[in-house]
Amino acid sequence: MYIHIGNNKVVRKEDILGIFDLDSSTVSINTRKYLTKAQEEKRVITLGYELPKSFIILTNQEVYLSPFNTSSIIK
């Protein structure tokens, strides 16, 4: 099964490690460190021009910033 995560990007459900709400999960210092390191390693891909609401981590360690909230992606 494929899941649409924003800006015409679809990923296989099996490739998703996690879908996280950007506002609530970035409260943790560990999450912020992870996202900063991923950004430095150029593994973060922003989907669209809107303010991101969630981030998706794939098995290949890519991180997608999505304009969709987590409940919309999970549906």
Image: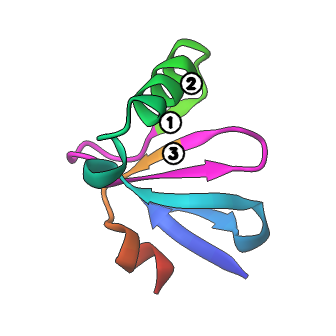
Looking at the image, tell me whether mark 3 or mark 1 is earlier in sequence order.
1
- Residue at the (47%, 23%) spot, across then down: 33
Q: Identify the element where label 1 is drawn.
A: strand
Which of labels 2 and 3 is toward the front?
2
- Quarter of the N terminus within the rendering: bottom right
Q: Identify the element where label 2 is drawn.
A: helix
- Residue at the (53%, 28%) spot, across then down: 34
Give, as a single range, the part of the protein colored magenta: 46-63
Q: How many marks?
A: 3
Do callouts 3 and 1 mark residues in contact (Cβ within 8 Å)? yes
Identify residue for label 3: 64
Examine the image and state in which quarter residue 43 appears: top right
Q: How far apart are marks 3 and 1 (CA)?
A: 5 Å
At label 3, counting other C-alpha atoms closer than 10 Å, the crowd grade (few under 14, some 14-19, many 20 or more) is many
Looking at the image, tell me whether mark 2 or mark 3 is earlier in sequence order.
2
Q: Identify the element where label 3 is drawn.
A: strand
Looking at the image, tell me whether mark 2 or mark 1 is earlier in sequence order.
2
- Residue at the (31%, 67%) spot, across then down: 69
Q: Where is residue 59 in the image (x, y as percent from the top left)?
A: 77, 49
Identify residue for label 2: 38
Which colour assignment does the render follow? rainbow
Q: Which mark is residue 45?
A: 1
At label 1, counting other C-alpha atoms closer than 10 Å, the crowd grade (few under 14, some 14-19, many 20 or more) is some
Mark 1 is on which residue type? Ile
